[in-house]
Image: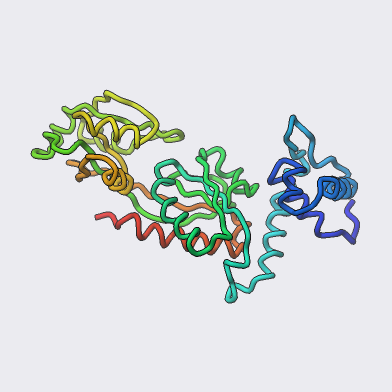
Amino acid sequence: MLHSKIDLNLFLVLVAVYQEGSITEAGKQLHLSQPAVSHALSRLRDKYQDPLFVRHGRKMIPTQLCQTIMPRVLSSVAELESTLHDIGDFDVHQYQREMKFGFRDILESIFFPELATDLMANTPNITVHSRQVSRLDMEAALESQALDIVIDVLTPTNNDIQHTLICDEHFSLICRKGHPILSDMSLANYINAEHALVTLKDSAVNTVDMALAKHGVARKFALKCEHYFAATSVISRCDMLLTMPNAYARLLKQQMPVEVVPLPFEVPILPVHMYWHKQAVHDPLNSWMREKLLAIAKRVIPPSS
């Protein structure tokens, strides 16, 4: 049973070990020695009568009890930290922190150049770390604070995941300069051409092919790969066509000899959302970053026509 008097700093150690998966790394984050972190963890283990973490290789793996209590611990620590900063007096320069993002590679290419340039120029105290995230990984990563914010088209099932629409994206056709289809953009010519397909991991439904199915037609694929940059490089040198989100297509047009034009059929808009865990609601820096990302979206992704 927990004693009525307990040092709240112990929970900061618990959070750090949980997030870092390492006593050494937790010490670096908290500017504590490894013995100090181990001692604090030992005190908590005595309080909870549970090991809280077990070592597996080089990682500290949380026990079942630890996993059970961590959502409340993380939320409580975030709420306590938020009381130190009145939102009206929020000053981002008070923070020295790494913000961790989950992006699909295409969205990382759209958002990161703007975000990184802005932060380096105005808030060098805030650094960023980005990685790709799957649907299965997203919810757990946000809950454990392994990620602060995710931007993607994924649909979470956990009610603890908050979200807002960050932009609507639509699809365009991208092809080499001088491609014959540019002089006669029709559905028939689109279908008769050979296509490149970018197969995104965790994407169960291809929106473009569903739209074509309504017309009773299907594309012929001559190339399948996992990255739009590689696919665009290929189609810039041949007569294959590539259908992709418009914002990234316009970005690639600046780098390769290609044209970006509307499709000869309608494809549903692709809603892109920003996700965060409800425990981050009381985190002023997380709120500040979400507002910044919304502003960037307005600049880099034009409204759908």
* Residue appearing at x 8%, y 39% in the figure: 183
Residue 282 appears at what percent x and percent y? 62, 63
Residue 100 appears at what percent x and percent y? 57, 50
- Figure quadrant of residue 137: top right
Residue 198 is left or right of residue 44, and the answer is left
Whether 39 is drawn above or below 297: the answer is above
* Residue appearing at x 17%, y 38% in the figure: 177
Residue 174 is left or right of residue 300, and the answer is left
- Figure quadrant of residue 59: top right
Task: Assign the C terminus to one quadrant of the image.
Answer: bottom left
Residue 124 appears at what percent x and percent y? 55, 60
**Number of numbered discs present?**
0
Q: Is residue 159 visible from the viewing direction of this image?
A: no
- Compare residues 123 and 192 and report the one nearer the observer: 123
Q: Residue furthest top?
A: 222
- Compare residues 225 and 192 and report the one nearer the observer: 225
- Figure quadrant of residue 285: bottom right
Q: Is residue 4 visible from the viewing direction of this image?
A: yes
Whether 170 is drawn above or below 231: the answer is below
Residue 192 appears at what percent x and percent y? 16, 27
Q: Which colour scheme is used?
A: rainbow
* Residue appearing at x 84%, y 40% in the figure: 51
Residue 43 is left or right of residue 197, and the answer is right
